[in-house]
Image (spheres, helix red, strand yellow):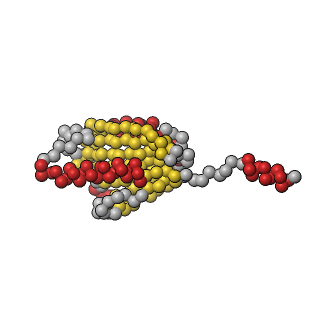
């Protein structure tokens, strides 16, 4: 009888859920990227990468991964909306796209882009591409930022350039398209 009860308890017990994990391919670039930050505790994980040919004193490109375990269950669109407001408060002028909500692999996601002209205290313009995923174990956020010297009077998300800057503008557009594709296709939460 004891064996039968034990077997019934095992059958009725909920299956242990496998730990979810963020899958992120190496960032696609001609120059490999190096990890400059790797911090974790019970509440948060923070990892950052920059191209190997850049240094931390003058970052132009950065990829950030954050896991907020204390925000599990938080709607990713709400989180991204709050983040966009904070970004807007740190810029002389800002333009945002999103958040755009969706579902991937059964998880709620949100995408957004922010174009910051005149970042406060940094004399920089910053383009930020964001993906947030609401997981069972936390909220996962991946950001790709493009930083450059501020263009006085610049309009967020609009680049004015001369004919001799056409190559630079084409490279910027290709880099932004690659960042967007990376977030959509190469960043996913897996059970």
The answer to whether residue 184 is left or right of residue 155 is: right
Name the spot of residue 11 as percent of width and height, x first.
Answer: 74, 50
Front residue of 11/70: it is 11
Is any part of residue 34 visible from this angle? Answer: yes
Is any part of residue 86 visible from this angle? Answer: no
Q: Quadrant of residue 115?
A: top left
Q: Residue furthest left?
A: 163
Question: Which residue sits at x=44%, y=44%?
Answer: 132
The answer to whether residue 47 is left or right of residue 150 is: right
Does residue 178 sit above or below 91 in this rendering?
A: below
Question: Which residue sits at x=30%, y=57%?
Answer: 57
Front residue of 92/174: it is 174
Q: Residue furthest right?
A: 1
Question: Which residue sits at x=23%, y=41%?
Answer: 158
Name the spot of residue 31 as percent of width and height, x first.
Answer: 30, 63
Q: Quadrant of residue 55?
A: bottom left
Question: Which residue sits at x=22%, y=38%?
Answer: 155
Name the spot of residue 50 as percent of width and height, x first.
Answer: 34, 58
């Amino acid at each position: 009888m004891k064996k039968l009860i034990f077997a019934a308890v095992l059958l009725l017990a909920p299956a242990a859920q496998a730990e979810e994990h963020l899958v992120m391919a190496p960032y696609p670039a001609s120059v490999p990227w190096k990890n400059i930050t790797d911090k974790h505790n019970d509440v948060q994980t923070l990892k950052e990468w920059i191209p190997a040919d850049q240094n931390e004193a003058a970052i132009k490109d950065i990829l950030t991964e954050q896991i907020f375990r204390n925000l599990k269950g938080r709607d990713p669109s709400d989180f991204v909306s709050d983040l966009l407001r904070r970004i807007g408060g740190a810029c002389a002028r800002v333009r945002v796209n999103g958040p755009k909500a969706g579902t991937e692999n059964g998880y709620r996601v949100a995408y957004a882009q922010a174009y910051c002209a005149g970042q406060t205290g940094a004399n920089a313009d910053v383009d930020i591409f964001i993906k947030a995923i609401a997981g069972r174990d936390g909220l996962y956020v991946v950001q790709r930022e493009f930083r450059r010297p501020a263009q006085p009077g610049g309009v967020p998300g609009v680049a004015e350039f001369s004919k001799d800057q056409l190559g630079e503008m084409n490279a910027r557009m290709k880099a932004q398209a690659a960042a967007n594709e990376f977030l959509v296709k190469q960043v996913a939460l897996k059970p």
